């Protein structure tokens, strides 16, 4: 016995977390997204990376 208060508290905390909606700073989000666009190299689907990976793992004496 005695679990009722603990369970009620856990339920209350879960509800607070689930329905909590913080104020979103949209200008800060826009700045963050705009600055992160140039961090990654452009995607290329040439297939060279797959060939390079296979060559890197091959045994040079296995041929």
Image: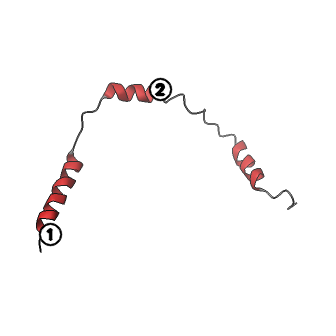
- 25 or 51, which lies in front? 25
Q: Image quarter for residue 40?
A: top right
Q: Is residue 25 left or right of residue 7?
A: right
Q: Is residue 31 above or below residue 5?
A: above
Secondary structure category for the residue under label 1: helix
- 25 or 7, which lies in front? 7
Residue ID for mark 2: 35
Which of disc 1 and disc 2 is earlier in sequence? 1
Q: Quadrant of the N terminus?
A: bottom left
- Give the residue drawn at x 69%, y 40%: 46
Residue 51 pos. (x, y %): 74, 48
- Give the residue drawn at x 50%, y 29%: 37
Residue 3 pos. (x, y %): 14, 69
Question: Does the residue at mark 2 contact the one at mark 1 (Cβ under 8 Å)?
Answer: no
Secondary structure category for the residue under label 2: helix
Task: Give the Cα distance between marks 2 and 1.
Answer: 50 Å
- 60 or 1, which lies in front? 1
Q: Quadrant of the C terminus?
A: bottom right
Q: Is residue 29 above or below residue 8?
A: above
Residue ID for mark 1: 3
Residue furthest to the front: 2
Residue 20 pos. (x, y %): 21, 44
- 12 or 19, which lies in front? 12
């Amino acid at each position: 016995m005695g679990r009722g208060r603990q369970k009620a508290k856990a339920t209350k905390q879960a509800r607070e977390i689930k329905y909590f909606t913080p104020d979103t700073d949209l200008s800060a989000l826009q700045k963050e997204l705009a600055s992160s666009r140039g961090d990654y190299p452009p995607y290329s689907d040439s297939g060279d990376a797959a060939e390079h990976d296979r060559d890197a793992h091959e045994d040079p004496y296995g041929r």
